[in-house]
Each structure stands twice: as C-alpha cells, then as structure tokens.
C-alpha cells in the first residue's frame, strides 16, 4: 500500500497566528500545506490571496498546495507561482480553456492539478490526463470548512485510482472535504494518496495525534 500524505488546510487555522500554525503542523508531521483561495464569486466565501502565501513561505519547508476557487484563475497564476506555490490546482468550471490553464501552470514551473466538484463528471479531465500531476476529488461542495463528507464520491475516487494506474504516470489522487479519522480510511481504501483536512487537524487539541489518526496510525 502507498503511504498517504496529509495536507492540512490553512482555512481552519487561527488566522491571527498563521506563521505559528504552519510551523506547528509541520512539526506535527504534515506533508503539504493546502491553501484554499476563494473569491466570493466562484464560491460563496472569501479567504486570502498570494500575499499570505508569500508571507508564510519563509516559515515552512512544506510544499504549498494551492487550491484555486476563483474565476477567472488564469490572470492570477503568476502571482501564486511567485508567492511560492509548488502545486496549483483549479476547477474546470473556472474558465473556458482548461488545457491552456494547465499549460500556463506548468510553464510557471508549478505542478498542475484539476479539482472535481461533487457533480463534475470524470469526462471533464479525460483529454488532459497526460498534463496532470494531481487530481483532487471534492467530498464537499467547495467554499467552507467543517462540512459533512459526501459519500457518493467514494466510487469516483476508486474509478480515478484505476484511471491513474492505467496511465503509468505519477498523478497524486487527493481528497478534500469532511476528511476525518472516520472518513479517511474509506478514502485510502478507495485509492486516495493525499488527504486534505482542515477541521480535523486545526480543530484538534493535538495536531500530531490528529495527523497520525488520519494516516491510520494508532497513537
Ligand atoms: C473547501 C476547501 C477545503 C476545506 C476543508 O472549500 O477546499 O480544503 O478547507 O475543510 P474540512 O477538512 O474542515 O472539511
Ligand atoms: Zn481545498
């Protein structure tokens, strides 16, 4: 079995102490830092932008895993790359030219990913599979932390696992939304290899124990 990576979502951190929060989850064993960028237009919430990434970049060695929930996304890709993003993922619904957006992310030196909303079919990525380093399956409707896990996405994760394995390429299969110690094992069983968790990490008293629990390590 593949080792699962944990990507805590900064959305659930204490925004008055972001530098300390990032250092704390890194020390607690987090693999990537998941950064949820929301514009109040593509999703009904506003979070933060590239200036926050830039400020945090010197506080951690974790890769920055940027989840764009903005439309349009293309004009802002250079700003996120310059702010220190390693990975940039976007929704097919965010613009008319997904292939071009993915090309732009690669050209900026970042790893491109596509995010599938609960209602978004797998056909949305059929013709760009060879461009992707990551596929993110949303198990909530994007916009807010702390929502309930949408079970109907588990077969989608399993299908994607088979599709990815068939390519023979390294494509990370990430799950985001309502991931807890209870739902994580089902995601892993379905084939996920990166779990995003906001509330389940930052809402826990002990970050290291919370991250270990998501991995399935009994503390
Ligand atoms: C939702 C975001 C998620 C969110 C996850 O729009 O993409 O990354 O922060 O939060 P939890 O883990 O609390 O569901
Ligand atoms: Zn996210």
Image (spheres, rainbow, N blue to C red):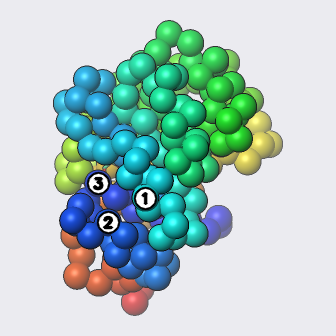
**Which residue is tagged 3?**
11
Per the model, the C-alpha gap separating discs 2 and 3 is 10 Å
User: How many neighbours does mark 2 have within 10 angstroms: few (below 14), some (14-19), or many (20 or more)?
Assistant: some
Q: Which element type, helix, strand or loop, lies under badge 3?
A: helix
Q: Can residue 161 be seen in the rendering of this structure?
A: no
Nearer the camera: disc 2 or disc 3: 2
- In the picture provided, is 14 more to the left or to the right than 56? left
Examine the rendered structure and indicate whether residue 70 appears above or below residue 86.
above
**Which residue is tagged 2?**
18
| Residue 166 at x, y percent in the picture | 75, 38
| Residue 22 at x, y percent in the picture | 40, 70
- Please give the name of the residue rendered at 23% of the width and 50% of the height, measured from the top-left corner: 145
Examine the rendered structure and indicate whether residue 85 appears above or below residue 164.
below
Nearer the camera: disc 1 or disc 3: 1
| Residue 169 at x, y percent in the picture | 77, 43
Examine the rendered structure and indicate whether residue 96 appears above or below residue 103.
above
């Amino acid at each position: 079995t593949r080792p699962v990576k944990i990507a805590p979502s900064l959305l659930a951190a204490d925004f008055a102490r972001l530098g300390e929060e990032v250092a704390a989850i890194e020390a607690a064993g987090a693999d990537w830092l998941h950064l949820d960028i929301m514009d109040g237009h593509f999703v009904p919430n506003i979070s933060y932008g590239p200036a926050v990434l830039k400020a945090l970049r010197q506080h951690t060695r974790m890769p920055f895993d940027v989840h764009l929930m903005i439309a349009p996304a293309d004009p802002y890709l250079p700003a996120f790359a310059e702010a220190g993003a390693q990975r940039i993922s976007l929704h097919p619904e965010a613009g008319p030219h997904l292939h071009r957006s993915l090309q732009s992310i690669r050209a900026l030196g970042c790893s491109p990913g596509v995010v599938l909303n609960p209602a978004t079919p797998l056909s949305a990525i059929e013709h760009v599979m060879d461009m992707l380093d990551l596929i993110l399956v949303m198990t909530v409707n994007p916009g807010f932390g702390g929502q309930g896990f949408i079970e109907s996405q588990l077969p989608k994760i399993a299908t994607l696992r088979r599709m990815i394995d068939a390519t023979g390429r390294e494509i990370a299969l990430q799950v985001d939304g309502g991931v807890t110690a209870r739902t994580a094992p089902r995601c892993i069983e379905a084939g996920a290899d990166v779990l995003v968790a906001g509330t389940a990490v930052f809402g826990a008293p002990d970050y290291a124990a919370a991250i270990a629990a998501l991995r399935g390590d009994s503390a």
